[in-house]
Image (tube, helix red, strand yellow):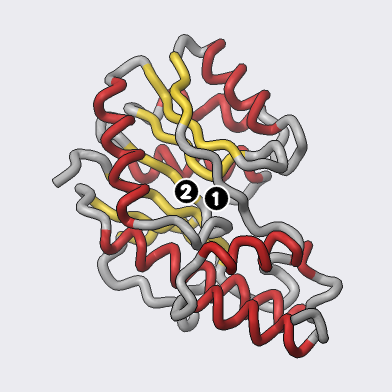
Amino acid sequence: MSATQVLVITKAPVPGRSKTRLTPPCTPEQAAGIAAAAVGDTLDAVRAAPVANRVVALDGPPGDLELDGFTVVPQVEGDLGTRLAAAFADAMPDGSVPTLLIGMDTPQVTAELLTRCASLLESAGPGTAVLGTAPDGGWWALGLHSAAPAAVLATVPMSREDTAVLTRAALQASGLRVVDLPQLTDIDHFPDAMSVAAECPPSSRTSRVVASVATALGLA
């Protein structure tokens, strides 16, 4: 059993609020359906990982999300960096539980990969962070040993081509050594969704829903 907890930050999958960069070509309802599938697959992977605790920082009402096995904390108001920093603080009230934060944009993640990431965070020890970048310049995972360094996230511009670079620099400026995790593609635009779905098992929610949407759009 890992000593690390996994923290998932996500919006409730609501049309017009979830994965809006999928629209167009998707309708808001199709985008929300892909978001719901991605969240479900991500939570399943976290459930299957032998970690110390599982937390969801949720923006919006849970609706039909299956959150069994997770402690749910509400996201605060503010931009993404502010909400990420607060999510770490809420998940680490005593400031001392190694925590790996991921989003819902990488549903191809597996329990085995999460276990390896948690192990790397633990072996790296205090004074380090682990960071998993995405090809678009963002990042999909960040692991910290205490909540205090997460405060720098509020100063980092998010959803940009240099977000990962700026995040790394901010963490290093706070005195942390940054260790790389494997890179994963995250879902922002529909071609990303197609690429990620191809990496998921055919039986996964993401694979099935993206295939259905692609067929409906004439893109299959």
Mark 1 and mark 2: Cα distance apart in space = 17 Å
First in residue order: circle 1 vs circle 2: 1
- Residue occupying image coordinates x 44% and y 63%: 42
- Kind of residue at disc 2: Ile
Q: In the picture provided, is 61 more to the left or to the right than 77?
A: left
From this view, report whether residue 204 is shown above or below residue 212: above
Q: Is disc 1 placed on a helix, strand or loop?
A: loop
Q: Which residue is mark 2?
A: 102
Q: Check disc 2: other Cα within 10 Å, few if <14, some if 14-19, many if 20+.
A: many
Disc number lying in front (1 or 2): 2
- Residue 106 versus residue 90: which sits nearer the camera? 106
Instruction: Give the farthest residue toward the left.
Output: 1
Please give left or right for residue 142 compared with residue 166 in the image: left
| Residue 21, picture quadrant | bottom right
For the residue marked with disc 1, what is the amino acid? Val
Q: Residue at x 76, y 38 (%)?
A: 160
Vertical comparison of 57 with 67: above or below: above
Residue visible at 67% across and 65% down in the picture? 193
